[in-house]
Image (cartoon, rainbow, N blue to C red):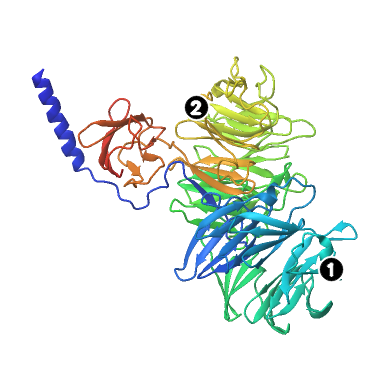
Amino acid sequence: MFSCIFEFMNLLRFIILLILFTPIHSLIAQPNPVGQWQSYFTYTSSTSTACVGNKVFFGQAHLLEYDTEEKSFTTYSKVNGLSDINIQLLCYDPSSQFMIIVYSNSNIDLFKDNVFYNIPDIKNLNVIGSKQIHNIYFRNKLIYISSDLGIIVLDPIRKEIKETYKLELSGSPASVNALDSKGGLFYALTNKGIFTADQSNPNLQNFTNWTLINPKNALDIVNLQDSLYIMDSTSVYKISNTSLDLMYAGKSKCKRLKKGVSNFYLCESSASERQLRVFDVLGNLVDSVRNINPSDVVEKSADELWIADIWEGSIRIVDRSIKDVIRPNGINLNSVYNLSYADGDMFVSAGNISAWNVSLTPASISRLKPNGDWIWYTRDNGTAGLEDKIDILDVAYDKRTGGMYAASFADGLWEWKPDNTSTTYKNTPYIVPYGGSNRLADVEFDNDYNLWMTNYGSDNQLVVKLKDGTWQKFSLPSNATERTATQIVIDDANQKWVLAPRGLGVYVYNDNNSISNKNDDKVKLLTKGAGSGNLPTSDPNCIEKDKTGKIWIGSSSGIGIFNCPESIFTTEGCDAELKIVKYDADAGLLFQGENIKSIATDGANNKWIGSENGVWLISDDAEKILQRFTTDNSPLPSNSIRKILVHPISGEVFIATEQGLVSFRGDATEGAASNDDILVFPNPVPSNFEGTIAIKGLVTNADVRITDVSGQLVFRTKAQGGQAVWNGKNYTGFRPRSGVYYVFVTNEDGSETKTTKFIYNE
């Protein structure tokens, strides 16, 4: 017995000596912690801007901050403070030092000292009619909100609405467009005309205390050195008592007035002319800034203007002539239709369709590199062949050449090569038009680098460009009115599964591994009903092959699972399993009644499900809901999900919604071939860290043990695919002491073992 103890102690000393000399991984380029969200919005269009000291802010789908001294960017979204998306208006009050953020749905955030305060009162009002907010005016540390509900007075210090002034004319309520003051009077611009009222009147809530002075329907107002200037949709006027003096008649739509120290500015934008007009204190037009498309402007100094630009995002103008576009690297468009992955990169297709009709969305592909950089392929940045393309729905990356193929739902197949040359395939014997458009919906390489694509509406809905450059086409059974074919998945038996929405079902095509010989091919249409495929509905939306080769079909009402796809053409056949689950008090079919838009599989074979009601993560066997995300409990910009893609290496779950792209760092990754590249993150673990600690780069389903320096076991778990997670607490539920901790990893048969260590701060 004593000899056994002696041998064990020697072994323990050996292990400790071994791991003491195991290097701790560098902090460089560590991934975001598990459970953390990230947003991916475009910076190419801005709606509003405000200046706070040396920082300039831009309202977009989210909030962009640029530090003019540090020359650095900070972005804010629902991930890190904002309460909503789609910013309509930014305004800053130097006296209270609050910046107000107004969203398009009338939600409001206040921002001060890097802290956000949500004021949802107007958004949540249960009233009939519009609640739109048009403008902001500051006075005596109060915020006066011009809206379709009237003038709403907000106290930013108390974070509450103080009172509301409702104006009306002849019994008809007025929408207030803007407010300013002069000589002790408020001037309110409404759709019924211009009203004034004594600022000191304690009963401004009584509309009879407001006087109509002019019937003009004006939209914006500024007070520059005690002169009032207003704007309607085409012109600028000066208010003289109760009359208006025309100062400028524009040729394009007037969008906003902004004042500086000695000048005021007019943003103009239309299809024909776009510019910023500069006026002096007397209302004379003194200058124009062109080659921009302004929606808002802020004067940082006499010779430095910042423009919120509709086309280019954030622009700096020096001396009214020198233009710099200053924005961070990001995705090209917030419109995301599809996501695809190849060779470490993610490709974002920004096409769009409505009821499988052309939508005329300009061609755009955004490519996310592993280092976080975005590359754009668009008609505007000189990408060959995209000048006249629209509605890109899918991208396939060619690892052999570094090129790409893209499916356009109007212009056929676009092939791009790294030397920026391209070829378009449309109106050919193989890609033929339907309804005047060459409608390709999906492209997919098989293992032999044959490129498969669906030609929606064609008599030959399935087309392949073979690796030798030759083509073949295949006809799928259809009816007289519908020849639909959309998403393709290739199963482990090399069979092509093709979705056929609009009431047809799912095609399975088997070319018998001899594409050029059609005589031995088989095709089957799967529909509803036992023996016919047993789909939940004949209106499929999405398809996914999981880690075990099973085929999951998401439909307009639930999910069907094909557990035996290789048997589709056998005598026994293979029907979808309509799984009965019990997620709450009642049992029912898997996601019955949910319009399933996307299914994605993570490294542990769990399924991410996207619908019109947000996102679910369910277990491998579909018996448990592991996560549930909506706009109410997460940074999702919308509950309407278009596509979900799980990055196999990082485990990052990319979620494309109708309002933009976000990601969630999931628990699971693809298993590695060996344990040679283990990474613990974060490392060191900060003392205030409350998130999840991850160990990635593991072989599939590895056994993971964490010990202290004495060899005492602190935590043990099994990897989810290639990643294990730890909540930072020991088996008693407490954080262990600060120090160095060791990770022992082994696979099921013990042939792959590895040791690493990390620093843990209590």
Visible in this render: residue 198? yes
Q: Which residue is mark 1?
A: 211
Report which quarter residue 679 is drawn in: top left
Q: What is the x, y in percent for residue 506? A: 66, 29
Counting from the top left corner in percent of width and height, residue 123 is at: 69, 49
Of the pair 632 and 185, the residue shown nearer to us? 185
Question: Looking at the image, which residue is at 73% across and 34% down?
Answer: 502
Q: Nearer the viewer, residue 354 or 195?
A: 195
Residue 280, placed above or below residue 209 = below
For residue 363, side relative to residue 326 (left or right): right
Question: Is 140 or 175 nearer to us in this picture?
Answer: 140
Query: Looking at the image, is mark 1 or mark 2 nearer the viewer?
Result: 1
- Toward which corner of the image does residue 9 lie, by quadrant? top left
Q: Residue at x 46, y 53 (%)?
A: 372
Numbered tag placed on residue 586 in the rendering: none
Q: Quadrant of the C terminus?
A: top left
- Where residue 350 sits in the image (x, y, percent)? 62, 51
Which residue is identified by label 2? 620
**Point 77% across, 47% down: residue:** 127
Residue count near mark 2 (Cα–Cα under 10 Å), binned few <14, some 14–19, many ≥20: some
Q: Nearer the viewer, residue 624 or 401?
A: 624
Marks 1 and 2, how far apart at CA? 69 Å
Element type where label 1 sits in the image: strand
**Residue displayed at 65% across by 29% down:** 507
Could you tell which of marks 1 and 2 lies nearer the N-terminus?
A: 1
Residue at the farthest front position: 202
**For the residue marked with disc 2, what is the amino acid?**
Asp
Circle 2 SS class: loop
